[in-house]
Amino acid sequence: MYSRILVPTDGSEHVERVVAHALDIAERDGATVHGLYVVDKGGMPELDAEMRDEVVKSFERTGAGALDEFRELAEAGGADVVTATAEGKPSKEIVEYVEDNDVDLIVMGTHGRSGIRNVLMGSVAERVVRHSPVPVLLVNVEQGA
């Protein structure tokens, strides 16, 4: 049913739960699992060029580590793996990756926020669900969920 599954990662400690769900589906369908890390430069405060470059490099190191962890988890689960990094607004880049790579399912974590916390913090997952041309499986990564 699915041949390419995307798992966007932000490097959080909950990636294992999300990858486990993606791997279950990938194993059943013989799908390739894609990992994507988005460097979000838009959320940075105004900084001088040197400081901004250092912050971007830090984000890139975080992304490389997140994708390494993703690759290890997915390969240990027996999946064929593709990883990529993008720069921009996470929800937009996730949807663009889906369209550019013929992904047919997104599996991503959500913290299950609602009410004022969601309004104040926003939700990448919510925006992806609204704009995705393919199904999105949300995995609640809150402790005890």
Image (cartoon, grey):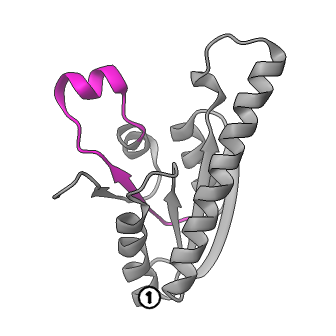
**Left or right placement of residue 4 versus residue 83 in this view:** left
Look at the numbered disc 1 and give the secondary structure of its residue.
helix
Within 10 Å of disc 1 (Cα), the crowding (few <14, some 14-19, many 20+) is some
For the point 70% across and 29% down, which residue is it? 55
For the point 53% across and 85% down, which residue is it? 76
Q: Is residue 90 above or below residue 36?
A: above
Instruction: Write down the residue under mark 1.
Output: 27
x and y, in percent, of residue 15 in the image = 43, 61
Task: Check if residue 91 falls in the magenta segment.
Answer: no
Closer-to-camera residue (89/53) = 53
Quadrant location of the C terminus in the rendered image? bottom left
Question: Magenta span covers which residues?
Answer: 103-124
Quadrant location of the N terminus in the rendered image? bottom left
Closer-to-camera residue (23/1) = 23
Closer-to-camera residue (93/66) = 66
Residue 69 visible, this orientation: yes
Q: Is residue 103 above or below residue 140?
A: below
x and y, in percent, of residue 91 in the image = 51, 39
Callout count: 1
**Left or right placement of residue 77 versus residue 93 in this view:** left
**Left or right placement of residue 94 versus residue 25 in this view:** right
Residue 32 visible, this orientation: no
**Left or right placement of residue 69 versus residue 142 in this view:** right
Give residue 75's quadrant in the image. Answer: bottom right
In the image, farthest residue toward the right: 50
x and y, in percent, of residue 111 in the image = 29, 45
Task: Check if residue 110 falls in the magenta segment.
Answer: yes
Q: Which amino acid lies under the numbered mark 1 shown in the image of this protein?
A: Glu
x and y, in percent, of residue 13 in the image = 41, 56
For the point 60% across and 72% down, which residue is it? 71
Q: Is residue 68 above or below residue 26?
A: above
